[in-house]
Amino acid sequence: MSSPQAPIDSDFRAASTAEDVIKGHDLTGKTILVTGGYAGLGLESVRVFTGAGAKVIVPARDLAKARKALADFKNVTIDSLDLADPKSIDAFADRFLAANPKLHILMNNAGVMALPTLSRDARGNELQLSTNHLGHFQLTRRLWPALKAAHGARVVALSSRGHTFGGVDFDDPNFERRAYDPWKAYGQSKSANALFALHLDGLGEKHAIRAFSLHPGGIIATDLSRHSYSEERLKGMGYIDDKGKPVIDPDNNKKTIAQGASTQVWCAVSDNLAGMGGVYCENCNVARAEPADSQELLGVRPWARDPLLAERLWKLTETLTGVAFE
């Protein structure tokens, strides 16, 4: 059963870093997969996981970029994966399962944000929904045997405060009839990430697999943010100063990469979450449940935490991908 969506006693806070969170954890003998683990939050996660002794697999669409970013990392394996390509996902999963009988942590970190024009994958699905949600759904299903074999695995899905832009449009998820809006598409995909973790946790609990979603915080120094906001908009939002430098204020959702990666690492390893699952987290804690009309900067909205919507999304996703769980 999913845990209550309410803050708990956590050992950490908004300003904590991924390095703070990983201290005291020995991950020797553990296998971890981090999608998008060669830039930004994913790269920082890989750094602390390997520093704690884990074996880390980083699937990458851009192999050259991944090899350059991870050149000095030990105990990291890089392999090819395009989350918008079902055949690529299947081929990667086949290779992974042949080499790795167990997967202890699956961090679905990769994503795209606010693509300016409507783009689709080969199946006709809108590309943000495809990359951020559908591809990770298929990947998780294919790696399910290795997660079950790990006996205590965790799945971490990166959602975002962007989920507040809107929920899943079940009548037109792929913008076939409604006008395309980059931010509505992004918000839909981030709400889907949270609902995915909620329903997955229900399926996985009997196998000792727990799932979590999270908002990492507002982090400007990543490819995702730089490519989606103009400098003037970032200044207006208070995320960069007049000289173009990031403003760091973690208690107000303005974080460094090290601070931003803390919550996903916390979801992956924290003893605070033992016996828990299905919740949306932020600032190294379980987030508050906020009403639909909330003006609060943080917290999770109803459409991203509703079990009935999570089940409905699950069925829609199986239809869109042609992939079904057990």
Image: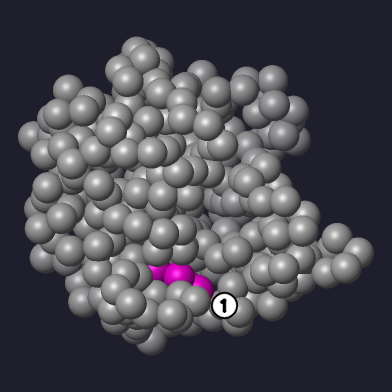
| Residue 194 image position (x, y, % from top left) | 31, 56
The residue drawn where x is 41% and y is 49% is 184
Q: Is residue 297 visible?
A: yes
The quadrant holding residue 292 is: bottom left
**Dot 1: element:** loop
Q: Is residue 294 above or below residue 276?
A: below
| Residue 47 image position (x, y, % from top left) | 64, 48
Quadrant of the image for the N terminus?
A: bottom left
- Is 29 magenta? The answer is no
The quadrant holding residue 91 is: top left
| Residue 251 image position (x, y, % from top left) | 60, 81
Name the foreground residue: 184 vs 240.
184
Residue range of the region highlighted in magenta in the rendering: 281-285
Q: Is residue 321 left or right of residue 8?
A: left
Question: The residue under label 1 is which amino acid type?
Answer: Ala
Name the foreground residue: 29 vs 291.
291
Q: Is residue 225 above or below residue 72?
A: below
Q: Identify the residue under disc 1.
A: 14
Quadrant of the image for the C terminus?
A: top left
The residue drawn where x is 56% and y is 65% is 217
Name the foreground residue: 136 vs 79.
136
